[in-house]
Image: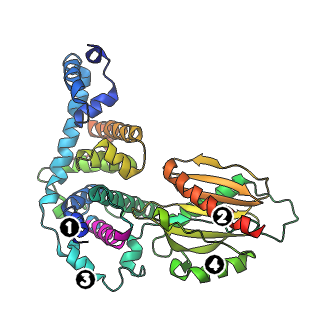
């Protein structure tokens, strides 16, 4: 049991990073991580071995998807624009562009891209987390990259911030 | 070498960027990129995206973990309610595998005389609608919790007018969350929700079907999928995330238990 908890514990920093990139909001992100941890501890008896890290990413990804579904009926809660909390600011201004670009992605594509690029999961692991074949992961990744490139190349001049 | 001369696909370019390319292809792709500046620009752009994402969020993992996310704190804070399944945190965290499950076959013993409009398509549509509606419901996903299984079974059986079975899916890691009564195409429908370890959600829905018996039919949507069948004038729909293998395993288990119920009756 201690081993299980330790395995869960070591994932927390990475889960916070993943959650932050998904929500782009520090409090929402930690709420998501908290729910993930509660969920994992509560389901310990259902965990039949395997990779705890992938399992944690799976829970968080699913909870985030559920969160987005609930939110989709309401106006957006967290602005990714000028109302960003101060602690959201990256070290350089470029952070906001990548935030907006990420926000423009379809959620499954965002999950896939962030799991690969930020969290360093293999395609196979992402396929397990998302419950889809590897080919689907790759096409999500490809579409995410096209979308981000279009976005950063100025495909949305209306949203570009004028300084 | 054949391998070296093989054309480079876009998938390979992504794999190259993500370090997923087999070692024996890396050099070939690098060589090919040197001769294809347009593709090289694209690859550079993908790398720049990844760098920007890491620059933006990478440092979060180095922050100290806030107290509320420390396991001791979480365990202490929820020690009284964590395993009861009733705390708000637990409910909110509960990722629900929702199965809308019908009861045993021969459910509607009082056979409807009117021509039932409910073919399996209609049932599938109703079930998918119920899935979409309740799968987002984290606070009140069910009317009767799974801890009151006997009551749930009694209640739904009474409302539906037939002895129902609540399949036990523990052996494949799914815990009963509870159930609710729903309107079906021609009468009442029963809906049970199950919960799995990783937050995937499924539903199984069951209602009277006017159409003839059918074989299992698979319907695939973008996010979720369902299996529908009609057995002895009762339609069943098992819905869940678009992971066909998993859904099929779940469906099989439901089918077997529901079928057993029918066998017992006859």
**Residue A78 in which image quadrant:** bottom left
| Residue bearing the label numbered 1 | A6
Q: Quadrant of the C terminus of chain B?
A: bottom right
Residue B221 x %, y %: 55, 48
Magenta-highlighted residues: A30-45
Structural crowding at the residue carrying mark 4, measured as other residues with C-alpha within 10 Å and reported as few (<14), some (14–19) or many (≥20)? many
Instruction: Say whether marks 3 and 2 touch (CB < 8 Å).
Output: no
* Label 4 in the same subunit as label 3: yes
Q: Secondary structure at mark 4?
A: helix
Q: Which residue is mark 4?
A: B153
> SS for tag 1?
helix
Report the Cα–Cα distance between label 4 and label 3: 35 Å
Q: Chain of mark 3?
A: B
Residue linked to disc 3: B76
Q: Which residue is depicted at the point 39% across and 49% down?
A: A108
- Asked if the stretch drawn in magenta spans residue A140, the answer is no
SS category of the residue bearing label 2: helix
| Contact check, label 2 and label 1, Cβ < 8 Å | no
Determine crowd level at label 1: few under 14, some 14-19, many 20+ residues with C-alpha closer than 10 A: few
Q: CA distance from mark 2 to mark 1?
A: 41 Å
Q: Which residue is mark 2?
A: B258
């Amino acid at each position: 049991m201690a081993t299980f908890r330790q395995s869960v514990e070591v994932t927390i920093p990475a889960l916070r990073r993943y959650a932050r990139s998904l929500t782009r909001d520090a409090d929402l992100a930690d709420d998501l991580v908290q729910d993930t941890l509660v969920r994992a501890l509560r389901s310990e008896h259902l965990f039949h071995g395997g990779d705890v890290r992938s399992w944690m990413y799976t829970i968080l990804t699913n909870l985030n998807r559920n969160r987005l579904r609930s939110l989709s009926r309401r106006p957006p809660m967290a602005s990714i624009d000028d109302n960003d909390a101060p602690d959201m600011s990256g070290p350089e201004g470029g952070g906001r562009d990548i935030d907006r670009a990420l926000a423009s992605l379809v959620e499954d594509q965002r999950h896939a891209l962030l799991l690969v690029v930020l969290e360093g999961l293999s395609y196979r692991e992402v396929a397990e987390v998302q419950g889809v074949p590897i080919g689907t992961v790759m096409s999500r990744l490809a579409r995410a990259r096209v979308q981000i490139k279009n976005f950063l190349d100025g495909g949305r001049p209306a949203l570009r911030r004028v300084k | 070498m054949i391998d070296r001369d093989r054309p480079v696909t876009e998938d390979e370019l992504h794999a190259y960027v993500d370090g997923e390319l087999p070692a024996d292809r890396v050099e070939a792709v690098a060589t090919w990129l040197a001769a294809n500046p347009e593709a090289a620009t694209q690859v550079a752009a993908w790398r720049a995206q990844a760098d920007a994402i890491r620059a933006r969020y990478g440092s979060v993992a180095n922050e100290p973990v806030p107290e509320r996310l420390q396991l001791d704190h979480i365990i202490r804070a929820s020690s009284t309610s964590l395993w009861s399944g009733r705390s708000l945190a637990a409910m909110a965290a509960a990722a629900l595998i929702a199965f809308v499950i019908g009861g045993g076959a021969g459910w509607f013993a009082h056979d409807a005389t009117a021509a039932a409009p409910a073919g399996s398509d209609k049932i599938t549509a109703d079930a998918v609608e119920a899935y979409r509606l309740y799968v987002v419901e984290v606070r009140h996903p069910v009317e009767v919790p799974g801890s009151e299984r006997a009551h749930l079974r009694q209640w739904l059986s009474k409302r539906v007018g037939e002895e129902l079975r609540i399949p036990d899916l523990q052996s494949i890691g799914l815990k009963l969350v509870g159930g609710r009564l729903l309107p079906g195409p021609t009468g009442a429908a029963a809906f049970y929700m199950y919960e799995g370890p990783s937050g995937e959600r499924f539903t199984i829905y069951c209602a009277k079907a006017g159409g003839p018996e059918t074989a299992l039919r698979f319907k695939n949507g973008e996010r979720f999928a369902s299996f529908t069948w009609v057995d002895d004038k009762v339609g069943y729909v098992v819905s869940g995330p678009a992971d066909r293998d998993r859904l099929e395993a779940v469906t099989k288990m439901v089918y077997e238990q529901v079928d057993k119920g029918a066998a017992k009756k006859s």
